[in-house]
Every structure is written in C-alpha cells, then in structure tokens.
Amino acid sequence: MLKRSLTTIVVSCLLSSGSALLADPNAGAYLAGRQAIHEHDFEIGARYLTEGLLGDPTNPYLLDRAMTSYVALGQMDQAIAIAQAIVDQGFNSQVAHLVLQIADVKAENWDGIFQALEQGRTVSPLIDGVAQAWAHLGNGDMTKASGGFDRVIETEGMTVYGVTHKAYALASVGDFEGAEAMFASRIPGGMRYNRQSGIAHAQILSQLGRNDDAVAIMDGIFGAQLDPGLAKLRDRLAAGESVAYNAVTTPEQGMAEIYHITAGAIQSEAPSAYTLMYARAANYLWPENTIATLMTAGLLEDLGQYDLSNAAYTSVPRDDPAFHAAELGRAEVLRSGGRIDAAIEVLDALARSHAELPQVFANQGDTLRQAGRYGEAAKAYSRAIELYSDDDPAKWFVYYTRGICEHKTDNWPAAEADFREALALQPDHPQILNYLGYSLVERGEKLDEALGMLETAAAARPDNGAIIDSLGWVLFQLGRYDEAVALLESAAELEPVDAVVNDHLGDVYWAVGREIEARFQWQRALSFDPQEANASRIRDKLDRGLDLVLLDEGVAPIRVASGDH
C-alpha cells in the first residue's frame, strides 16, 4: 500500500500542470496513450499514460511506457521519477535501470552506481563495466579505474571500448603517454575509431609534440572529406600548433560517450524508439556534444516526429562547428513535414553563412526542385558542382538532378549533357540510364542507343517497374510489339497503380489487337489520377482508339489485329 501511495504521489506531481486527477482506472487514457505510443507521438502518449497511472499506479505497462515517453521527449527528470517508482514496485526494467544510472551519473553519485549493480539493476555488460570504471575515477581512484577498464578490455567483444575509454580516462588526468600507449596497443581486428576517439587520439599526439603523426591519424580515419570542425583541427595540427586535449575530460562525458556509442552500435538493428533512449541519455549528460544531438534529431525524424526533430536540430548553437549539419538536417525535417517554404528559408540563410560548402547548395537544389522551382534549383546545383572536388563521390548525383531540372524547363541539350556527364562519373548507373534512355524514347531520338541503355538498366534492376516499363516502351516505339507486351505486363505487375505504366500496357495491347484489354488498361490508368494532359489523351483513346489519336498527332497509325505490323 505504501509503494502504491508513493507512486500515486509521483504521478500526481507529474500532472500538477493542470490535468484532472482521476481516482479510478481510466480506460480511455490507457487506450489513447497506447495508440499515441504506437504512432510514436511521445508528447500525447506521456500525457495520457500518466493520467492512466493515477487510476492504476502499479500497472507495469503504463509505468514503462510513460517513462520511455518522457525519455524520448528528453524530459529526463520526469522519467527518473517514474523509473524510481518502477524499481520501488519491484519490476525489472532495463530502461528503468538505465534511467536511474543516468541520474546517478548526473548527480555524481558514484557510489550509487556500485549500489545499483549490487542490487542487480544492470543495463548491459559493456555499459555496466565502463560505468564502474568511470565511477572509480569519479571517486578519485585512478588505480581502481584502470583496473575496471582493464576488465572491460579483457572481455571478449568489448576490447576496443575498454581501450578507448581507458585512453580517455588517462588523458583526462594528464597522462598522455599512457593514453597514447592505449591507442597504440594491439587490438584484435585493429583499432576502430569513431569521430570522438579520432579527435582524442589526434589531440593526445599533439600534446606529446607529434603533430605530424596526429595529421596522419586524422587522414587515415576521416579521409579528405572533412566537416568544418575536423578541418579546423587538422589545419591547426598541420600548422604546428599545440592543441589542448578536450575530447572526453570527465566521468560524466565518458558515460555520455558510451551511451552514444551504444546507440550507434544498435541503430541498424534495434527499433529507432529504443535507440533513442541511449541517444537521449548522451544528450542529457553532455548537451554540448552535438554529434549525439544530431543522432537524436535523426532518430526522431525517422519516427516521424518532425517537431521534436526540428527542436533538437535548433538546439545546436550557431558557433558550433556542426551548425551547418544541424541546419541541413533541420531543412530536411521541414521538407519531410511539408514545410517546403520554411526549408528553403533555412537553406537560403545557410547558403549565405556557409557559401563554401557544396552540400548546402546541393540540398538547396533538391528542395527547390521538390517545390517545382526548377530554374532556381538548376542554379543551386551549378554552384554545388563548382564547389565539389572532381573526385567527390556526390558529384554525379548533382549532375543528374541538374539534368532533371533542365529537362523540366525544356532545355534538352543541357539536360542530355548533364546526364551524360553523370554517366561518365557513374558508368552504367541504372537510375541515370533509365532517365536518359526514357527521355530519348519520348523525344523519338537515338532509339537504338536508348534501347542499349535501358537493357543495361533492366539487367541491373530487374525488379524495378519503372525501368522495365521504359524498356518495354522503347521496344514499342521500335515496333517490336510482341516483345514489348511481356515487359509491359511485368512492369504493370511491379507498379500496379502507376497511371503511366497502365497506359503504356493499354497501348501495346491495342498494337497487338487485344482491344478489349487495351481499353481496360486505359480505364485503369485513368483511375490512378494521371496528369490532366495525359488523362485527356487517355479519354480520347477510349473514345476513338489509339490509331485515330496517333493520326491526329501526325504519327502513322498502328495496323492492328491483322498481323501486319
């Protein structure tokens, strides 16, 4: 009874902003909260689930989902209160253990880390092992901290994490020789870096007077494509400047980093909502680490929570080296959320403040193209092409997308030149081959070359309905109707609700004398809301047949049903 009362007090405090207090189980709140969580609407979910807890304060589902909703919202204080209630009720919850561990780290309650583990409140072998080592350092005992990191190093599958965090710890107390020895140690499979550990190693080498080695490390890890923050660090190292160590300097930052690393490790396999728990943990402990912030924003975008994602991106300050990346992400979120004009405004401002970055102009072009502003998009793409280095792997796509814009504005010579430039950079790329080949077919030009392009594209992407349709259509234009039928039927199976594909299939059925089936396909095409010009032509074919429509267009009619093709 006491535990129930304490939980009710906790939940009541969370709702003290004005929600009605309920004395009995609230089925409506439960169902609304459950639906909101299913849709990843964490704000609505947290509200209704917390209301539901007032009437049913020991319900493990409500406790768990309310807690995770608050974590997803970044409202960690509320999550901590519910996590404590979960533990007090005797429920076993990995996320509750994680949240309470975060609370201990934030409060620098290092003994609390050990006490939780003694009570069986574990998170994972890696996180628990690293947490104990950092907790020893938090208590001022580097000897025990080293022993803790060594135990992580000796655990199969965890060696690289133990080595990296021991190097952080040694560097944080000024032992740069010891830290460098950790990075230089032999690890099965070799040392694996992320952005933070790469920066740390370079800074450690600089503190040892080995800037040339630091530059070599950076080049080996990050290559030539550096973001502004990394580029600035490399320039300072190359100039011989002694760069201070500030990569990971406190136990709190060390724990934030292991949470961030965990999020990255599970991101490709675990649900985004679960991965978000660890990214938010990193944010809470180390809000200045914008790389973790960018991960959080990206996860929220994946979950369709565009407002929350936008808020995360907006939290990155203008003077942060990652500001441009945050603004690019914010523009993409605005675009995904249907706020195209707002996305364009963000990119226009970024083009003024970061006029040296080609990706800014490439993204600006993409957004303007989506808005149908093809002339402006082509200008943005042109600027991106000027800024990209000749060997940049992204350059082919900008030629391709600029070609699309030029095609849309009826500048075919420029469009064809761009498509061919893109092909020179990405030979036999199916996407380019399909667009260029189909465009040539529609223009009635170079049909034999277009056929070769589309055959190559179809061989690479046999399950792509648009490409198979293009190949069938060029055969239709070449008068090879019998061959075209099978391909266009396959395309219609792959793209059953595409108006153009069904229209093409109707034409080829007409060409081989299958008039009833042709009219059926044209009727289907109309049902899929084609553009008005195409719809008008389809209606004309339904009224008069394809031959008379072609005759009016100045094209020789198809001789049908007689075998005289």
Image (cartoon, rainbow, N blue to C red):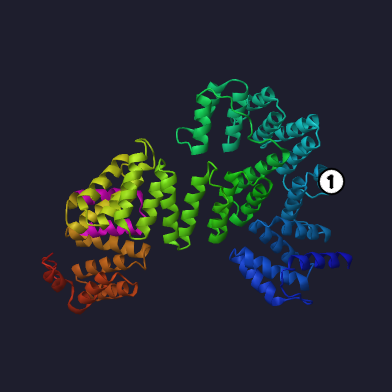
SS at mark 1 in the image: helix
**Residue drawn at point x = 41 percent, y = 47 percent:** 352
Image spot of residue 384 (x, y percent) = 36, 44
Q: Quadrant of residue 96?
A: bottom right
Q: Which of 320/10 is in front?
A: 320
Question: What percent of the width, then of the height, locates residue 208?
Answer: 62, 21
| Res. 199 visible in picture | yes
Magenta-drawn segment = 449-475
Number of numbered callouts drawn: 1
| Secondary structure, magenta segment, majority class | helix
Image quadrant where residue 169 sits: top right
Horizontal relation, residue 408 to residue 68: left or right: left
- Residue at image position (84%, 67%) is 4
Kind of residue at disc 1: Gln
- Magenta stretch contains residue 455: yes
For disc 1, the neighbor class at 10 Å (few under 14, some 14 to 19, many from 20) is few
Q: In this rendering, would 554 be left or right of 296?
A: left
For this rendering, which residue is in front, 502 or 212? 212
Quarter in which the N terminus is drawn: bottom right
Q: Which residue is mark 1?
A: 115
Residue 300 visible in image? no
The picture places residue 409, in percent across and down from the top left corner, at 25, 57
Q: Is residue 380 above or below residue 30?
A: above
Is residue 141 highlighted in magenta? no
Residue 387 vs 559, above or below: the answer is above
Q: Quadrant of the C terminus?
A: bottom left
Residue that lies at the very extreme toward the top in this rendered image? 209
